[in-house]
Amino acid sequence: MRHAPERCEAEDRLWHELRGRRLDRIKFRRQVPVGKFVADFICAEARLIIEIDGSQHADSNHDRERDAELKVRGFRVLRFWNDDVLRDLNAVCDTIIAYVRDESLQPWR
C-alpha cells in the first residue's frame, strides 16, 4: 500500500531527526512489525510507538482497534498529524522526548 506523498514527506522528515540516536540519544527503529501491525517508529526501551497520520485517519475505527491491541502489548501510541510534523518539527520532537523520559504520560488521541 502506498502512502500519500505528504505522509512520506512527514515520515521522512521525522525519521531524519530520530535515526542514529540523533534525538536526545534515544534509539528508534522505523517500520517495525508489532503483532499484525507495523509501527511507523518505535522506541522499545520506553515502549512508545510514534504514528504519523494523514487526514484519512481522523476518527478511524481501524486506528482505535490497532491502538487497543498495541496497548494490550504494553505500548503507548503517540500520534501526530502530517501537518504537525511538517509545520512544527521542533515541537513534535520535544513532545517525543517528554514521552520517552516520562513513561507516566499518556497520549491525548
Image: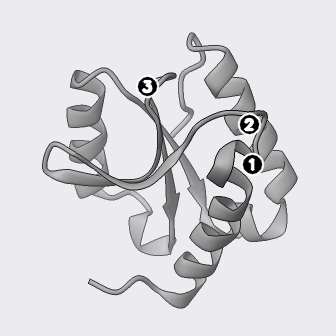
Residue that numbered label 1 is attached to = 92
Alpha carbons under labels 2 and 1: distance apart: 5 Å
7 sits to left or right of 76: right
Front label number (3 vs 1): 3
* Amino acid at circle 1: Val
Marks 1 and 3: in contact by CB < 8 Å?
A: no
- Position above or below: 76 against 92: above
- SS at mark 3? loop
> In the rendered image, which quarter contains the N terminus?
bottom left
Dot 1 alpha-carbon crowd within 10 angstroms: few under 14, some 14 to 19, many 20 or more: some
9 sits to left or right of 43: right
Q: Which mark is residue 47?
A: 3
Which residue sits at x=54%, y=31%? 107
Residue closer to the observer: 105 or 46: 46
- Position above or below: 12 against 79: below
Alpha carbons under labels 3 and 1: distance apart: 18 Å
Which residue sits at x=62%, y=61%? 15
Marks 1 and 2: in contact by CB < 8 Å?
A: yes
* Amino acid at circle 3: Arg
Residue that numbered label 2 is attached to = 95
Which residue sits at x=54%, y=77%? 7
Report the colour scheme.
one colour
Dot 2 alpha-carbon crowd within 10 angstroms: few under 14, some 14 to 19, many 20 or more: few
> Residue 99 at x, y = what percent?
64, 26
- Position above or below: 47 against 91: above
- SS at mark 2? helix
Alpha carbons under labels 3 and 2: distance apart: 15 Å
> Residue 71 at x, y = what percent?
30, 27
